[in-house]
Image: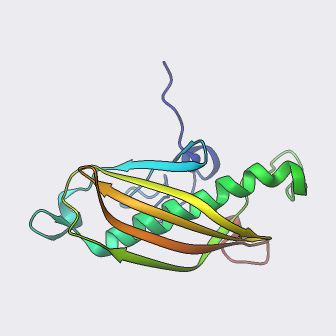
Amino acid sequence: MTAELSLQEQYAAKSICFGCGPANASGLRIRSFVRGDVLECRFTPSAHHHAFPGVLNGGIIGALLDCHSNWASVAFLMRLLPMRGTPHTGPFAIVAPCTVTAEFAVKLKRPTPMTEVLLRSWVVECDGPKVTVEASLEAGGKTTATCRGVFVEVDETHPAYHRW
């Protein structure tokens, strides 16, 4: 039986992003999966991700929510590719659009324990290349953080365009 590949493994295997890059051995290496209209990710923190004993660092929470939400925008735009025409052509075509974070805000609702967390993200608005995403982070069945972000598709003139 073959393990399911995450979006990151399918479309950005060479990415070195700290949060979501499969090629960054020191990064968080999140793995996001499409589940209907929601993107899901399970992540288990390591000891060096502590803020203080037993609690996950807020910066790590922000990185998890940012990268996971960005991939929700990518997955959403990929669904639209047949309708808007694939901008990438040729034998080495990249199927995933490249998006970057334009803005995001995280609300830390309660301390997040150092256990497996569940991230969920979903698109709430799309205006051309600009996608607005909301997300939550849960631990032990309780929402410990939420996020709202805007992610923008970029073209080949942007430095991040060729990152995957």
Does residue 142 appear in the picture of this structure? Answer: yes
For the C terminus, the quadrant is bottom right
Rendered residue at 41%/55% (across/down): 119
Q: Quadrant of residue 128?
A: bottom right
Does residue 89 appear in the picture of this structure? Answer: no
In the rendered image, the residue lying farthest to the top is 1
Residue 130 vertical placement versus 47 (above, below): below
Total numbered badges shown on the rendered structure: 0
Q: Is residue 120 left or right of residue 128?
A: left
Compare residues 92 and 53 and report the one nearer the observer: 53
Q: Is residue 2 left or right of residue 60?
A: right
In the rendered image, the residue lying farthest to the left is 53
Compare residues 101 and 159 and report the one nearer the observer: 101
Residue 65 vertical placement versus 10 (above, below): below
Rendered residue at 56%/58% (across/down): 122
Residue 55 in percent (x, y) is at: 17, 66
Compare residues 10 and 145 and report the one nearer the observer: 145
Residue 90 in percent (x, y) is at: 89, 49
Residue 112 in percent (x, y) is at: 23, 63
